[in-house]
Image (cartoon, grey):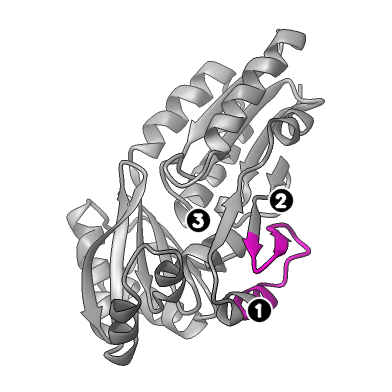
Amino acid sequence: MIKKIISDSGANVLHLDDASFENIPLTIHVDGTDYQDDASLSVNEFIEALHQNDGKTSTACPSIAQWQKAFEGADEIYAITITSVLSGSYNSAVQAANLYREDHPETKIHVIDSLSAGPEMELIIDKLKELIDAGLNFDEICAKINAYKEKTHLNFALESLDNLAKNGRISPAVAKVAKMLKIRIIGRPDDGKLTPIGKARGAKKTISYLIKDMEEHGFSNRRVIIAHILNEEGADNLKQAILAKHPEAAVEIREARGLCTYYAQKGGLMVGYEA
């Protein structure tokens, strides 16, 4: 029996060791060029393209056909998508699952709206692999992963607001002032919408704010994944600060791919954690 995990590229995961896994890329439109968020994408070149672009940008979710193709050959499928508030990926996956079941009624498919992005999705993917490896049946895995999702969270800290300004989400003047004063915007998903919850001036205050919010949401010595956008130093400083207060925590640092880079931008940090 083939049990397969499928994720769109909002999760930053291209490969999963010792597991049947597939990444389905979203497409990012920048200045007339389409960037596929797959293994061929150079994040450095993509960031430079965003920096040089003065116009609006956009993203396109995977098609129903892409999801259906990814379903082929599997007996049980666990599909996870970036928050449905930001993308149509979840709806596309659900429609694909409904159509696929018509021709393959024996195939079991569970589609998960992460209501999040990046490292929180990675935590859920890793847990899915753990449950599959434990030999649980489909219904057990669905119940346990749904319960686990309620215990995971995401925070983010943005150093640059340029892309948000270019897309009309904030005033260009606000973005410019924030950059001059080195103000970081800190946020988390609120019912799937990535929502600012505060701001901090400088890296140290940003780290303190992030850890405080994590603790207020139940974090203590659990698992953490930090995704960074060309900010390994900031990610490591955050890791060391977490371990200083929670020495038994398991903290990993990973690089963000295209879609998370598009939203968090250069210098951004995204923190997925268990509570």
Q: Residues within 10 Å of mark 2 (few under 14, many from 20)?
A: few
Q: Quick one: SS at disc 1?
A: helix
Seen in the image, is 224 located left or right of residue 111?
Answer: left
In this picture, which residue range is highlighted in magenta? 29-48
Q: Residues within 10 Å of mark 3 (few under 14, many from 20)?
A: many
Q: CA distance from mark 3 to mark 2?
A: 18 Å
Mark 1 highlights which residue?
A: 44
Q: Quick one: SS at disc 2?
A: loop
Q: Which amino acid does the dot numbered 2 rest on? A: Asp
Q: Is residue 214 above or below residue 62?
A: below
Mark 3 highlights which residue?
A: 118
Q: CA distance from mark 1 to mark 2?
A: 25 Å
First in sequence: mark 1 vs mark 2: 2
User: Residue 59, image x and y in percent?
Assistant: 58, 53
Q: Which amino acid does the dot numbered 3 rest on? A: Gly
Residue reaching furthest bottom? 180
Q: Is residue 181 above or below residue 2?
A: below
Seen in the image, is 222 located left or right of residue 46?
Answer: left
**Measuring 77% from the left and 10% from the top, which residue is drawn there?**
103
User: Residue 89, image x and y in percent?
Assistant: 57, 39
Which of the two marks, 1 or 3, is nearer to us in this view?
Answer: 1
Mark 2 highlights which residue?
A: 17
Residue in front for this viewpoint, 40 or 119 = 40
Magenta stretch contains residue 188? no
